[in-house]
Amino acid sequence: MNSKHLRWVFVWAGLAWGLAQPGPAQPKPAKPKPPSPQAQLAKQYLATARRYLVRQAELEHYFRIDERGIATFASFADKKKNEPECLVYWNELASFKNALLNLPRPGAIEYYLEKKSRKFTAQEIKELKAAGRERTPVPKGARADRPLQGYRIAIDPGHIAGDIEMAKIEQRFVILDLDDGTKISFCEGDLNLGTAQVLKEKLEKLGADVLLTRNRPNTGARGLTYQSWKKTELPALLRAAQKSGKLTAAQQTHLLTKAPDAQLYEAYFLPEDLQARARVINAYQPDLTVIIHYNGSPFPRRPWNKPVSSNYNMVFMPGAFLAGELASSEARFDFLRMLVLGNLEGSAQFAKLVLQEFTQRLQVPPVPVKNRVFYLNFNSIFVSQGVYARNLGLSRLVNSPLCYGESLYQDHEAEARLLNLHQGAKKQTSPRVRQVADAYYRAVARYFKVEMEGQAK
């Protein structure tokens, strides 16, 4: 082998030896840092907001959820400048929750508006903690025969009408002349109250403490009939509206002398009554709230005077703010309040249980997923078949997990015949009303994990 070949052998051998040797140690890739507790909370709360509260994307102009906490903004411009209307830091959740639960609504809204991005002082945290709800402990073994002992349950029987005259003012009634000559007339307010009274009795037998927001026909949560309210309170209400510039003198006179009762009820009595119901419920601080309504076919619209062939159940939970529904500071307060109180998942769970019990006990199916009901398709968020989040007046104000039930269609001919038994001089409670009450009762028991014979799984 000549010298030239020998030189190339050494070169290749050297290269091979070099390739075989380990190079300098490479640094191991750094493990990704686990998300901070604050980041995890932000992810959780943002998912909840988008799942139940945000019906339209424009709403995100009014809030931000990040590692600092939950912030609301009066406008998108304020959000871009990072100037919160209110910012609740993650370590303030418990304190802010106590403020929401224990302050009257006007005081809580004032607290919200004054907070902005400042942090609670140590003294405020101490005072808010002291204001937290306290319950008398239930003695050991006391729940054996009364498994709901220690729980508070609020029941709101929707509407107020106890007769057709008042029901026509509310526009919640059924009047049918059937082909066989049967004449049917009843009002939803009466059905709701009868159902609530049966439910209250059943829950109290399990040891629950139960509140009814109203307990007499034709009477609202403040103990006033519509006619009494119209005579004693409406004039002062309209004078205040004129003084504040909301009404002219001519409009005030027209409302007092010529406006139909249905208009006055819808515009003035009903909003006040809903606020009163919410005040009563929130002062009671329930563990669960049941809002009782019966449904009616949306085709044709009220009054329900023609029998329909379809018949469905549906239930609602709070949520589903629309694009323009965070324009006011009060609405943004409610949006933040719902997130801080943390009742949305509980409401979804309870609503699903109520829908299941409606389906099984009443043998009426949930409204189909594909339907033509306007308020389901445009005003609500689909949660599961028959269960929707919807921004209803009362459910938006209540500080507990809740279900707003809409059982069956009152104007379905077979249902109307059964429900009509609730009317008459003796005011007998129909078996159908008792079945509806039983469905709510079993759903409440399941929510609190009380085992019952024959309950739905």
Image: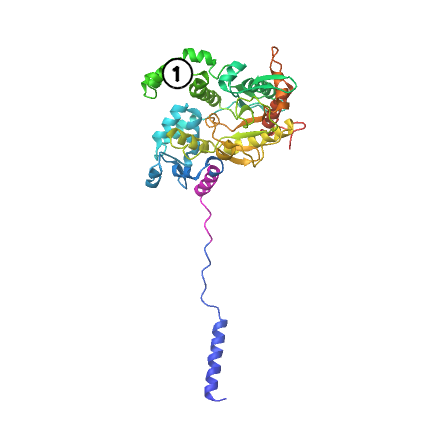
Q: Dot 1: within a 10 Å radius of its alpha carbon, few (fewer than 14), some, or many (20 or more) residues?
A: some
Q: Is residue 162 magenta?
A: no
Residue tagged 1: 255
Query: Depth check: 201 or 233 in front?
Result: 233
Q: How many marks?
A: 1
- Disc 1 marks a residue whose amino acid type is Leu
**One can see residue 381 in this view:** yes
Q: How is the image coloured?
A: rainbow
Quarter of image, res 37: top left
Q: Taken as a whole, is the magenta stretch helix, strand or loop?
A: helix
In the displayed structure image, the side of residue 417 where residue 323 appears, left or right: left
Tell me where residue 161 appears, x and y as whole percent.
52, 16
Tell me where residue 352 appears, x and y as whole percent.
57, 32
Q: Is residue 45 magenta?
A: yes
Query: Depth check: 49 or 255 in front?
Result: 255
Tell me where residue 335 appears, x and y as whole percent.
43, 32
Query: Depth check: 256 or 270 in front?
Result: 256
